[in-house]
Image: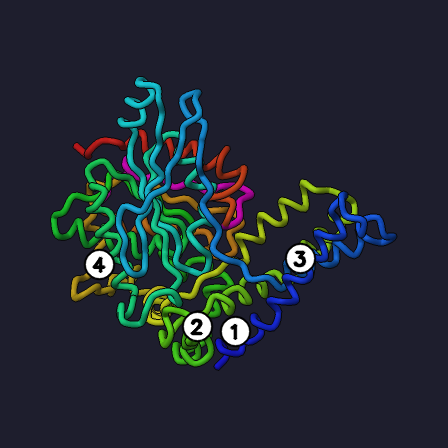
Amino acid sequence: MLYQIHEWQRAFLGPLSHYADASAKMLSDPSSPFAQVPGAQRMAAGYELLHRLGKEYEKPAFDIHQIQSHGQDIAIVERTVLARPFCELKRFKRYSDDQDTIERLKNEPSVLVVAPLSGHHATLLRDTVRTLLRDHKVYITDWVDARMVPKEQGTFRLDDYVEYVQEFIRHIGAHRLHVISVCQPTVPVLAAVSLMAARGETTPLSLTMMGGPIEPRSNPTGVNSLATTQPLSWFKGNLIHTVPPNYPGHGREVYPGFLQHAGFVAMNPSRHLNSHWDFYLDLLRGDLDDAQAHRKFYDEYNAVLDMPAEYYLDTIHTVFQQFLLPRGLWDVRGERVTPAAITKSALLTVEGELDDISGLGQTEAAHTLCSGIPTDRRAHKVIEGAGHYGIFSGRRWREVVYPQVRDFIKRFDRPAG
């Protein structure tokens, strides 16, 4: 019922948001006579703020069409190379008309970026992808909003996530592949590669795990505490709702994106309030650059997706309540997850000093679990001054983190001897 109430509210606010948008443009366009009315700029700023608070935020585009690499402009074409009901494997194909550059691009390593399925769309890693494209062939998991998946497609659980990762690795080819997992997927990625290693399959050349809850008992954050202070029944009773009739996934149980977004905002309400007030003041001052930066950030931040209920509840139970991975008790489809079985893949873990989502030590714990990987094929980096998002997006990612990730991949871009 809560989901339906949300849809009614959205339907009510829609026309008001469109009216506010039209009014803001009418009052701020220099060619409009209404822009000359006293107080027009203040009214336009207020209307735009109202529009942005009430509008619906659709999934943004990756919008990566060109990069600078090897001293040239390289064209980028985004395409889906493998589609599954709950995820699309996408590749950002690089093109050049210079033969020498083409040969260089062909010989560069492939990277699979496993994006989180934890509220935001994979486009949150746009900066990650754009930077990696300088020196790598890049693939990414683009998770589908569960409300858009017809109920007839069946359920999606944490075990299915693990199988998707394995399928994508096999499809690309593990023999020249490096996998980067950001936040939540560090757990299923480690499980997927562990199972492949235990079966004797070829595993990726390297694994880079960034800010993930491998061992949530280490330096627990507020996110970890919530999961341990409430029983699983609380999450099911309070956070799981049914998709209403106006979506293809009608009848599917999900953890709705609008509830996840409310949780994101509740973690730092004063920060978001101040950000919106600053946006209003920027519009009044005519500071268009800062105003556009605000729009760009919140266009991404406010775009959320629904998670399949079964997957979400599995994650809470397996990762944050029972700690089955670090305890060595996790079975996927009847197979025990044993990270010590990994011997050929190199391992890099990256943590942010100020990460308030995955605390220090939670990702580093992968080294203890992956005892089969030789010490000289493992590395751990703590990024000073970085929060959760800073390790994969923004200036600190591009200037501090990426060079270390790039060099690690280059160092191990060959099968272990």
Return the residue nearer the eye: 4 or 218: 4
Mark 2 residue element = loop
Q: Residue at x 72, y 59 (%)?
A: 47
Identify which amino acid the numbered label 2 is placed on.
Asn
Under mark 1, the amino acid is Glu
Query: Residue 7: which numbered mark, if any?
Result: 1
Q: CA distance from mark 2 to mark 4?
A: 40 Å
Q: Are marks 1 and 2 in contact (CB under 8 Å)?
A: yes
Q: Which residue is mark 4?
A: 337
Helix, strand or loop at disc 1? helix
In the picture of the structure, the residue carrying the numbered disc 3 is: 21
Cα gap from disc 2 to disc 3, whole angstroms: 25 Å
The crowding category of the residue bearing disc 1, from other C-alpha atoms within 10 Å (few below 14, some 14 to 19, many at least 20), is some
Q: What amino acid type should be assigned to the residue bearing mark 4?
A: Val
Q: Quadrant of the C terminus?
A: top left
Dividing the picture into quarters, in which one does residue 105 lie? top left
User: In the image, is residue 383 part of the stretch drawn in magenta?
Assistant: yes
Report the Cα–Cα distance between label 4 and label 3.
52 Å
| Residue 169 locus on image (x, y percent) | 23, 46
Q: Specify the segment rendered in magenta.
A: 373-388
SS at circle 3: helix
- Residue 364 appears in view: no
Q: Which residue is mark 2?
A: 246
Say which of marks 2 and 4 sits in front: 2
